[in-house]
Image: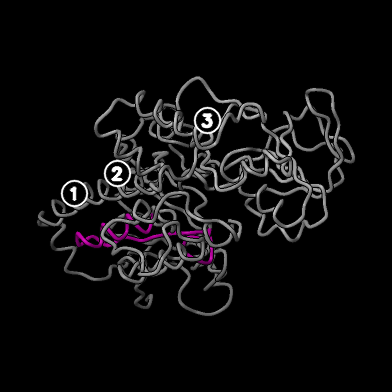
Amino acid sequence: MPTSQQDGGGERLFHGGAGDGDGDGAAAAAAARQVWVPGPVIVGAGPSGLATAACLKARGVPSLVLDKDATVAASWRERTYERLRLHLPRGFCELPLAPPFPPGTPPYPTRDQFVAYLDAYARAFAVEPRLGSRVRAASYDAAIGFWRVAAVDEAGGAGETEFLSRWLVVATGENAVAAWPAEGVGAYRGAVMHTSSYKRGDEFAGKKVLVVGCGNSGMEVSLDLCNNGAATSMVVRDKIHVLPREILGISTFGLSVFLLKWFPIKWVDALLLIFSRLILGNIEKYGLRRPKIGPLQIKCSTGKTPVLDIGALKKIKNGEIKVVPAIHCFTEDGVEFVNGCRGDFDAVIFATGYKSNVPSWLKEEEFFSESDGFPRKAFPHSWRGKNGLYATGFTKRGLQGTSYDAAMIAADIARRWTKSLAGPTAAADADHHETYIAN
């Protein structure tokens, strides 16, 4: 007889055949076990997963959160640079049902302050993810009406567990893995890294560093390198919008949100660009060409965020950060640019963003796109698929989009949860805290 075991989220264990002894028999049992989860399985313990679990708990629905890393919010904690601050004011970065940031938090919280906020959020709602559980595959079994989620225990050596649930919430988000250029670096012999591995600029003091990418990460890493004595060049390949972080003492984002309540997006874009020209000057003469479409229109149509300047532009203007064109090819000691010029560099840092990892593990083709790992439907209809499949954190609208998704998903699952418990079979099953079925 298997001994009673209660896991997080109220799961119920199914196994059999190998007994409870030590040695190979016990290992085989662990590797073959199945666990039924009464509530949803949430894949990802970042802000999206935590917010969804919290909203579900507030409605009386248990959940099981799985994450491959050893901590919650590992991307924020381990794969961001030390100088990082939130680009938006703290009021726009709060998760649902949570109190405001602690008193004394600056308008733009640091990375460590935001991580502490997420830790406190998880504690407040008693969200205890099963950490070190890497989801290898997830697929819907139409024969039984459940999602099968196979997760590998990365830390404890417990083998693979298959979780069965009526609902699956994909919360791995837009930035699950680093995006690298497909062409690689060829014969280049210097140091190469992605901004996900970059921590601080003093490691590159006195070195010539090429930053590939000019989004918010590329600009901030270039600024950090420059401030720490590195000779910094930044590749600007595409047209970009650079806006001041604040306009007349008001956050640019907050001002945009307010204006959009009253004016068409084209008018708001035009006003933002007028203010940007007055505050930042003509940035095109420094190699930063603006798109013809306004920054908010681009954000809505593509999800591409405008750069909010925090000091890099001043370094570009005075020549401390050198703007260079796109790369034609890498050489042993550096790169050749598309304009025929060459440059030698001690290190290359790719600020080329991140991408979804959903296609690598979710065996489903209708709701999620295989090409980019995003829901095929655009916001605000991107949170729900078929057969109990949900997505949170794929809105391209930051933490506000995450909060919207979490609230919608929790309300929908709670309605179905309540309906299922109302049936006689479900009600009877709910009275039994643990059930064991031999395979």
Q: Work out whether 327 lies above or below 420.
A: above
Residue segment shown in magenta: 49-74
The residue depicted at 57 percent of the width and 64 percent of the height is: 154
Amino acid carrying label 1: it is Arg
Q: Label 2: how many residues lie within 10 Å, few (<14), some (14-19) or many (20+)?
A: some
Q: Mark 2 points at which residue?
A: 388
Q: Mark 1 points at which residue?
A: 416
- Image location (x, y in percent) of residue 31: 52, 64
Specify the farthest residue to the top.
292
Q: Label 1: how many residues lie within 10 Å, few (<14), some (14-19) or many (20+)?
A: few
Q: Nearer the viewer, residue 293 or 212?
A: 293
User: Which label's residue is closer to the chain start, 2 or 1?
Assistant: 2
> Which of the labelled discs sits on residue 371, or is there none?
3
The image quarter in which residue 41 lies: bottom left
Determine if the magenta segment contains residue 72: yes
What kind of element bears circle 2? Answer: loop
- Image location (x, y in percent) of residue 169: 36, 49
Q: Work out whether 34 lies above or below 364.
A: below
3 and 2 marks in contact (CB < 8 Å): no
Q: Work out whether 113 lies above or below 244.
A: below
